[in-house]
Image (cartoon, grey):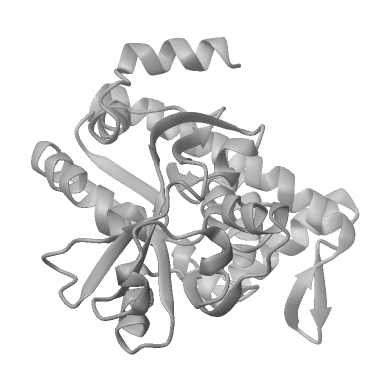
Amino acid sequence: MKLQQLRCIHEVVKNGFSISKAAEALHTSQPGVSKQIQLLEDEIGLHIFLRHGKRLVGLSEPGQHVYNRINEVIREIKSIKQVSDEFSQSNTGVLTIATTHTQARYKLPNVVQAFMSKYPEVKLNIHQGNPMQVTNQVIKGEVDIGIATESISQNDKLFCIPCYTWNRCLVIPAKHSLAKEKVVSLSKLATYPIITYDYAFTGSTTVSKVFHDAGLTPNIVLTAIDADVIKTYVNLGLGVGLVAQMAYDPKRDQGLVSIDVSHLFPTSTTYLGVRRDVFLRGFMYDFIEMFSPQYSKQTIKKLMLENN
């Protein structure tokens, strides 16, 4: 069993079972990739892939288990490389972050600017998704750091730290009837068409639980992952927007007003998470501290030891 064989399996799955794309990623030939796959299958006596003619179309049941272990091996190799990089070129490398649109749009810009100024030789990638997608990307090792609310802190494979709390507000056109209300009740809100985040009413999230516990069914007419999209449709008069308070800026969102509804919903907490087995390079510690200044490198190391 050779490392190159494991790399071939990993890249084929990563590239949607395309041998040609895997070969390109590995800087080798398609026949070379196919040969390495066949050699490994012969050695372990299992068909890792499902085939349709000469095409690979998926993983077999045992192949899925094999791939899971290959993925762990590739991740460990990456960690070893990170250790090497840390002690040879500590100010160069790649940092990949997964986060929600709200964090990327309203909380990260200043942090990213400061980080890139300090580490111009580090390539920074930002992936966006809902909290569950962010969590899965961190677990799979596709990203180094995940920043999201709720679900990311509930996975035992991740080490998470609470960064800050936030609540919600309504955004409505200035001439909307609700603009005259000093305090909006939950029952009143439930009578209006609501535009909100697409993950806010799935599972047991805070917002859906509040309505459910009150015996109310909200009238959700439109959902999006992007607060700016939500505000666009609010401006069109399609409903009232329920968004994070940080997503409203009176200077930028002219024509809209904000109504505080923090009395209706409990606060949410934004967490930053990494895999428990990951090796954090120096610039990763710095990024975390830039995002949440209460966590120095020493504090994070201490917390990780206490929670492992």
Name the residue: 34% across, 28% down.
281
Question: Would you identify the image quadrant in which residue 279 lies?
Answer: top left
Percent position of residue 128, x then y:
41, 61
Percent position of residue 99, x then y:
41, 53
- Nearest the viewer among 23 and 271 is 271
Percent position of residue 134, x then y:
51, 53
Q: Is residue 40 visible?
A: yes
Q: Quadrant of the N terminus?
A: top right
Name the residue: 41% across, 75% down.
240
- Nearest the viewer among 271 and 213 is 213
Percent position of residue 285, x then y:
31, 27
Q: Is residue 125 visible?
A: no
Name the residue: 35% across, 78% down.
177
- Nearest the viewer among 168 and 143 is 168
Question: Would you identify the image quadrant in which residue 202 lies?
Answer: bottom right
- Nearest the viewer among 60 and 149 is 149
Across the whole image, how many numbered discs are drawn on residues? 0
Question: Would you identify the image quadrant in which residue 155 lies?
Answer: top right
Q: Vertical placement of 295 versus 224: above or below?
A: above
Q: Vertical placement of 288 versus 39: above or below?
A: above
Q: Vertical placement of 166 versus 226: above or below?
A: above
Left or right position of 16 against 114: right
Q: Quadrant of the C terminus?
A: top right
